[in-house]
Image: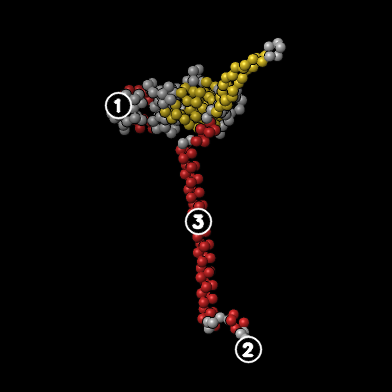
Amino acid sequence: MSYINSSDQSQSSLPPDKEGVIKSGLKRLNQSLVLMHRTRLTVWKAMLITVFVAGFASALVLAVSQDWFGKIWGAPSSITNQATVTYKDSTNKSYSGTSNTVTTNIVASTGPQISLKVLPEEKSMNYSGTVSFYVYTAGATTNPVVQASGTADANGLIVIDAKTLTNQSYDLKIVTLYHLSTSLKGISFTGTNLDLSTSNPLRPKAGNLQDADNIINSLDWQVMSVKWGTNDAVADVNHDGMVNTLDWGIMNKNWLVSGD
């Protein structure tokens, strides 16, 4: 009787050198597949991160452009409830109630404001324009506690945000283009809205064409003289469409006058 050696069946029929080559090739193929898989995962992660960042940036730009934050934080909100009244008599018998909708509006507080009216000389038809304002502690001339700019409307009205001011006295300086600065001194602020538009309209003097030294002098005349006979918007002090003796008359009236 013959026997088959089982160990001989388990041995590869390939020569040792070819078997080694195949195993090495399979190993390299497996490593390549693993590397490709990892690369794909890395690419997908990078793409997801890029899409997320781009989407967030787009949403932020849209929110800012549409003022969503201002609408969310600054817009009035409301609370609506249903109120019902039930009647009972002396025997404690109840009668059908009457109901109605009750809405409470909640408006975000903007803090106290100071209202001013700025009426620059020779701008009688339309007082709109850029106004720079400086708020100083009373008696001080440096280090303003508030410094900002805004646009006055056609009537010269401008509103200053005063929520950072404390209850004390202040001096207020106003600066407008091509006019001398002017001021209000000793303003008593009590933490509430302060309307100075009626009682204390500010009237900056015209003619400060050089617009840097806050005094009307020969430097301003130099600006006007080279524009004589033209319709230059700066040198045409009275805004009649022509730089001429009428404009010089206004400048001469304020000659050597300094701003506050």
Tell me: 100 left or right of 255: right
Give how far apart the Cα atoms at labels 3 and 1 are: 69 Å
- Look at 39% across and 30% down and name the residue there: 209
- Look at 43% across and 25% down and name the residue there: 153
Question: Label 3 amino acid?
Answer: Trp
Can you tell which quarter of the image residue 162 is in?
Answer: top right
* Residue at the right extreme, as displayed: 91
Closer to the N terminus: mark 1 or mark 2? Answer: 2
- Look at 44% across and 32% down and name the residue there: 213
Number of other residues with Cα within 10 Å of mark 2, as a class: few under 14, some 14 to 19, many 20 or more: few
* Residue at the left extreme, as displayed: 229
Question: Label 2 amino acid?
Answer: Met
The picture places residue 206, in percent across and down from the top left corner, at 40, 25
* Residue at the top extreme, as displayed: 90
Can you tell which quarter of the image residue 98 is in?
Answer: top right
Q: Which residue is mark 1?
A: 242
Q: Please state which of residues 249 and 59 is positioned toward the viewer in this rendering.
A: 59
Give how far apart the Cα atoms at labels 1 and 2 are: 134 Å
Residue 189 in sight here: no
Q: Which residue is mark 2?
A: 1
The picture places residue 134, in percent across and down from the top left corner, at 52, 30
- Look at 60% across and 83% down and name the residue there: 8
Q: Which residue is mark 3?
A: 44
Which mark is drawn over residue 109?
none
Dot 2 falls on a residue whose secondary structure is loop
Q: Please state which of residues 78 and 63 is positioned toward the viewer in this rendering.
A: 78
Question: Label 1 amino acid?
Answer: Met
Number of other residues with Cα within 10 Å of mark 3, as a class: few under 14, some 14 to 19, many 20 or more: few
Residue 10 in sight here: yes
* Residue at the bottom extreme, as displayed: 1
- Foreground label between 3 and 1: 3
Q: Is residue 18 above or below residue 61?
A: below
